Image (tube, grey):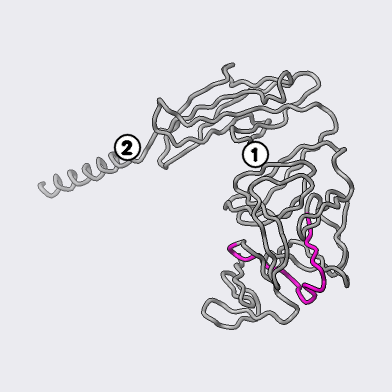
Amino acid sequence: MKRLFTLITMICALFGCQKAMAGTDSKTFYAKCTLAVAEESTGRGTVYFDDGTTEKVDSKSDTGVSTTVGFQVQITANEGYRFSHFTDQDGKTVEDFDPSYPYVNCYTNSEDSENPTVTNLFAHFVEQGDEVVYTKAVSGLSYATLVLPIETTVSSAFAVYKVVGLDGKTLVLEFIDNTVPANTPVLLQNSSMFESKIKVEYGNDLVKEVCTATNGLLKGVYKGGSVPVSNAEYNNYVLQEQNDVVGFYRVESEMTATDFCAYLQVPAEQANDVKVFYLNDTVTAINAITTGKAEIYDLNGRRLNKLQKGINIVNGVKIIVK
C-alpha cells in the first residue's frame, strides 16, 4: 500500500511539474497595426480593418520569442483605380499579402501590453490600364539575376550585387544594398532558408523588347531576347544549376533569355579558357573553373570522379551540392 501511495505521489508530481513548465514556456505577445492610404494614392481608395477602424491591437500566445498577429482588412478602390500593394513604414513592399485572402500579418516581440510592437501599413492604388505585375520567386539560399524597368526595393532577405570586373580568374562583386536601380542588371542572393519573392508593377511603355542596359559585366534582357553564343570577342555566361551546382556557365550555342534576367559577358582575352564561374559559399567573389579537367576532392582529401552530395573541393573552390 505504501508503494502504491509513493507511485501515485510521483505521478502527480510529474504531471504537476509538466503543467508548471507548460505555463512558464507560453508567452503572450502584443501587436499594434495601423492602416493608411499611401500619400501618392490619396483619393484613389480606402483601407480599413474588418471593424471599420484603421488602428488595431491584438495579442497572441506563443512558446517562442516572437510571433505574428493576423488582422483582416477591407480594401476598396475608387472608380478607375485598383489596389496594387502594401508597403511598411520602411517603404518595403509587403510580399506575402494576398488580396484574395485579405489578412495582414504583423510581427511582434513585445510582451508589454502597454507598448506593443507597431507596424504601419500603407495601401497603394494605381490607375486601371495596361499595367503589368511581375513576380519573381527565388528559392531559399539561392541566386538569381534581375533587371527591372523601375527602381525597386526588395525584401531584406536579398543581397544585391554588381559584378564589377575580373581579378585573374575571379569575378569581383560589389554589394549595393537591397535596392535594384532601374535598368540595372544585378545578381541577387536570397540569404533566407525560405523562398522569397520580388513583386513589381510597371507600365508596358517602360519595357523594350531587349534591354541594352549594362551594369559592370552583366547585360540585362527584358522580354523576347536571347543570349548570344560566345565568340572571339566575348564569352557569355548564364546563371544555371547543373548537376546540383549553381554557377555562371558559358554559352556554347545561342539560347533564349529568361525574361527580366541578365547574363554575364566577359572579354574573351580575360576568360578564354573559363567554362564556368562557380558561386562560392561566402559570396564575396565568384571563382572560375577552366577548360582543364576539374580536380574534385572531398574534405578528407580523397580524389573523386564526380561531384557528390555535401561539400566538394573543386580546383581549390568549396562547392556545396545539396
Residue 253: horizontal and vertical position, in percent?
A: 87, 68
**As shown in the figure, which amino acid type bears the numbered disc 1?**
Glu
**As shown in the figure, which amino acid type bears the numbered disc 2?**
Gly
Helix, strand or loop under label 1: loop
Residue 103: horizontal and vertical position, in percent?
A: 60, 30
Image position of 28 with respect to 318: above or below? above
Q: CA distance from mark 1 to mark 2?
A: 35 Å
Q: What residue appears at the point 81 percent right and 50 percent down from the top-left corner?
A: 259
Inspect the magenta stretch and tell me whether residue 131 lies in it: no
Magenta-tinted stretch: 262-282
Taking the image as shown, residue 218 lies to the left or right of residue 28, namely right
Check disc 2 and report the residue beneath it. 23
Q: Nearer the viewer, mark 1 or mark 2?
A: 1
Helix, strand or loop under label 2: helix
> Which numbered tag is attached to residue 95?
1
Image position of 194 with respect to 24: above or below? below
In the picture, the quarter occupied by the C terminus is: bottom right
Residue most extreme to the top: 52
